[in-house]
Image (cartoon, grey):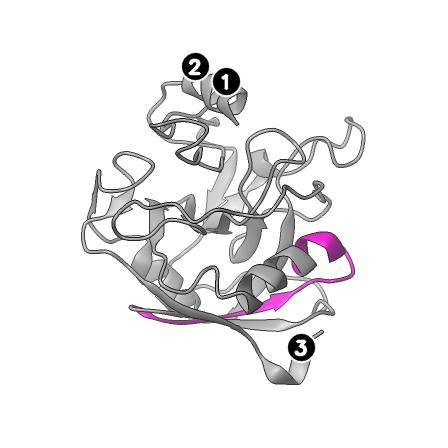
Amino acid sequence: MRLAALTFALFALAWPALAEEPAPPAASPEATTDTAAPPATAAEPATPGEMPAQPATPIGPRVLIQTSMGDITLQLDSVHAPKTVANFVRYAKEHHFDGTVIYRVEPGFVIQAGSWDAHVNYRPAHKPIPLESGLPNKRGTIAMARGEPDSATAEFFINLADNTPLDADPAAPPNTTGYAVFGEVTDGMDVVDKISVVPRGDNGPMKGAAPVDPITIIKVSVLPDTAP
């Protein structure tokens, strides 16, 4: 993770293009805030409130994220990202996310959460999982944040736009580039959009990206009708 933080810190540009996992305190006392910026045409911003256009409904569990600004329902995709879905469900059932905050808001890009609370305390995570980066990072999809490939743990983000720079490079070997999309928002995209425009400050692991008024994840639940 230290190597990943140093790599990303080389790119001190205004609008971040990569959704990296901030380094936990044991790896680095200060999480990196700088990442590479894509060309202005790389992503296609969507109109707030517009739901993402997706193919057929994925097969997998449904998850409810209850936040202090409203509820977000996810349909996870166990077919295309089975290990990533199992990892997320494990953290949800262990209540790892409950009481944490959305610590990164980048308008027109992503909102991000996982292991940090409002006091910038980090919750230890399990061992990293393999990268499953086959699905596109379209608006409304949920994906895992990471540093190096095969380093994702509990940090996740929801795409606010069609973030094509985060997709896997088709010319590269499978699961070596890109970010692992493992589901999509099916209800509550209006809540995601409201979160994306809140005032931001420095009280978080990624400076300048944390909501001034903390947005708490009250509970993450696997809905009983789809529990694996």
Q: Amino acid at mark 3?
A: Ala
| Quadrant that contains the C terminus | bottom right
Cβ–Cβ under 8 Å for marks 2 and 1:
yes
Q: Position of residue 212 (x, y in %)?
A: 19, 49
* Residue drawn at x 33%, y 26% as measured from the top left: 14
Which quadrant of the figure has residue 35?
top left
Graded by Cα atoms within 10 Å as few (under 14), some (14 to 19) or many (20 or more), the crowding at tag 2 reads few
Q: Position of residue 185 (x, y in %)?
A: 53, 65
* Residue drawn at x 25%, y 49% as measured from the top left: 119
Q: Nearer the viewer, residue 111 or 153?
A: 153
Q: Is residue 139 visible?
A: yes
Which quadrant of the figure has residue 150?
top right
Q: Nearer the viewer, residue 8 or 125?
A: 125
Q: Reading the chain from its start, which is encountered first: label 3 or label 1?
A: 1
Q: Amino acid at mark 1?
A: Thr
Q: Which residues are magenta?
A: 69-85
In front of the other: label 2 or label 3?
Answer: 3
Graded by Cα atoms within 10 Å as few (under 14), some (14 to 19) or many (20 or more), the crowding at tag 3 reads few
Does the magenta-highlighted stretch encompass residue 36?
A: no
Tag 3, which secondary structure? Answer: loop
Q: Disc number at residue 7?
A: 1
Graded by Cα atoms within 10 Å as few (under 14), some (14 to 19) or many (20 or more), the crowding at tag 1 reads some
Q: Is 204 positioned to the left or the right of 98 in the image?
A: left
Q: Is 19 positioned to the left or the right of 175 in the image?
A: left
Q: Position of residue 173 (x, y in %)?
A: 80, 29
Farthest-out residue, bottom: 225
Q: Is residue 106 visible?
A: no
Q: Nearer the viewer, residue 208 or 94?
A: 94
Q: Amino acid at mark 2?
A: Leu
Q: Disc number at residue 227?
A: 3
Q: Which residue is label 2 attached to?
A: 10
